[in-house]
Image (cartoon, rainbow, N blue to C red):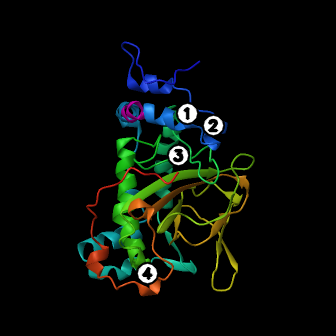
Amino acid sequence: MASTTTENQPGTSNLTTARALALPSREAMLHRHPSVSRFWSQNRELLTDAWREWEETEQGNLVKLDDSLLDTKLKNAVESAWQDPTKESAVEDLWQEVSPGVYQCQFFDPDRLVDLRDYLNAVQEAKIPLRPPYGIALNRFGAMLDKRSEGFLAAPDFQYLYNQLLDKYMRPVARLLFPEIIGYDAQTFGFSIQYQPGIDTSLQLHSDASAATLNVNLNLPDETFTGSEVDFYDPNNGDINRLSFSPGMAMLHRGAVAHAAQPITSGKRTNFVLWLYGNHMQIPNDNPSQTKPLSAQERWTLLTAEKDEFAPF
């Protein structure tokens, strides 16, 4: 039986030792058994070192992860706004409101998604334990992305991209579209999900414990799926607005907006889900109209606040 401890055999690398670990069972994870948290806590340092070692050994085979993977129009508009915040309207124009409090934009360049997916496929083939998301349900082929999470994807190059997406893109855009989140956006959280028929197929109606949520599709242009639409509840009339993802497209919405994923009927859908929220899991109240106006400069400012160590799930 594979070891569940962090003790290295003489001459054994961290990568080899990490690969020999036995993950907790799906049942134990679903039921939040204390042994599960203990497993990730005891092996945190080992796994972090293993991901660093893996990335170093695979350096010649892995694409560089940076914002060149993003849609050119979005990338250029965001870079211009960072240089001169008064030009932020070019960023706002790229986001279309498709349901109350829900905005849609081309986020990743579809032609570059193959590079990101190749990296993520290599992550799966690395055989280093990753903690799947188990919040409302367990998504077996997903992973935790944020450093505060147990069993997160600690590869340094990936962490660089992950933090760029949150700090350079998501936070200022969310402040632009949802000005009430300022003061409730210092903390971050992220995970990946994959839906496929017969395994993890859907998610019931729920809201997020976030001020804002960014949900980005990672499917390749020739990687089709059916079903798996996202339903958003319209509080104005009680209707459900059903939306579909295309490759590299993002939906950005207030966490309080109720939404659900319909069952997938063929193919696979792969997404990143990123959250912003305040210290101690605080989120804004339900009355955005009471928010004080923000200056463009306030929106396009990097935060220096310390990250806490609390993960929502």
When the figure is inspected, residue 144 is found, relative to residue 79, above or below; the finding is above
Question: Label 3 crowding class (10 Å Cα cut-off): few <14, some 14-19, many 20+?
Answer: many
Q: Is residue 228 magenta?
A: no
Task: Quadrant for residue 55, please give it.
Answer: top left
Precedes in sequence: disc 3 or disc 4: 4
Question: Label 1 crowding class (10 Å Cα cut-off): few <14, some 14-19, many 20+?
Answer: few
Precedes in sequence: disc 3 or disc 1: 1
Question: Label 2 crowding class (10 Å Cα cut-off): few <14, some 14-19, many 20+?
Answer: few
Which secondary structure lies at badge 4?
loop
Residue 93, label in figure: 4
Which secondary structure lies at badge 2?
helix
Circle 1 sits on which residue?
35
Which amino acid type corresponds to the residue marked 2 in the rendered image? Ala
Can you see residue 132? Answer: yes
Circle 3 sits on which residue?
143
Along the line of sight, the residue nearer the viewer: 122 or 141: 141
Q: Are marks 2 and 3 in contact (CB under 8 Å)?
A: no
Question: Which residue: 73% across, 58% down?
Answer: 263
Question: Which label sits in the foreground, 4 or 2?
Answer: 2
Give the farthest residue toward the top.
10
